[in-house]
Amino acid sequence: MKLTATQLRKIIVEETKKALREGGTDGGNWNSVVDAAVTAFYDAAPEYDRNDPSMRANGPTGWSEQLEGAAEDFRNEVGVALDKIVEKLHNGDYFI
């Protein structure tokens, strides 16, 4: 089963809200937000399908390695974006 970008965003938003409720955000505990987003990424990733040409080339192990690499990129990108947003938050950039 493949998920749309909208469905993935919804899962990430839900997991992020859950992490914020459970872990809080005091003391720089933003890692729990990134971890929740990465967990959502893994949950949304399609299982290996030997009939899917984009997965078939390197087999299930290759697909797993691809997924690991993609998740690491995702973690890095989310972390960078979150750092920028938190900095803006602390600078008061969201005052209207």
Image (cartoon, rainbow, N blue to C red):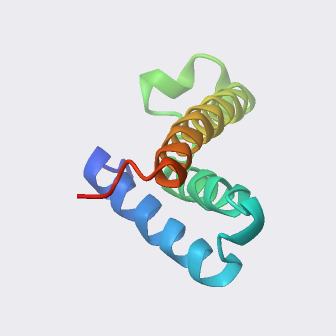
Counting labels gives 0
Q: Is residue 4 above or below residue 61?
A: below
**Which quadrant holds residue 61?**
top right
Residue sitting at 69 percent across and 33 percent down?
A: 72
Closest to the observer: 43 or 75?
75
Q: Is residue 9 toward the left or the right of residue 20 in the image?
A: left
- Determine the image quadrant of residue 83: top right
57 versus 1 height, above or below: above
Q: Is residue 80 above or below residue 57?
A: below
Name of the residue lying farthest toward the left: 96
| Image location (x, y in percent) of residue 66 | 65, 27
- Please report the residue visible at 52 percent of the width from the left and 38 percent of the height from the top: 84
**Location of residue 91 in the rendering, given as x and y in whole percent from the top left corner:** 50, 47
Q: Quadrant of the C terminus?
A: bottom left
- Residue beneath the point at 58% across and 82% down: 21
Q: Position of residue 32 (x, y in %)?
A: 70, 63
Pinpoint residue 22: horizontal percent, then vertical percent.
66, 83
Quarter of the image holding residue 31?
bottom right
Q: Residue at x 44, y 22 (%)?
A: 53
Comparing 34 with 69, the one in front is: 34
Foreground: 85 or 42?
A: 85
Image-based side of 38 in relation to 65, left or right: left
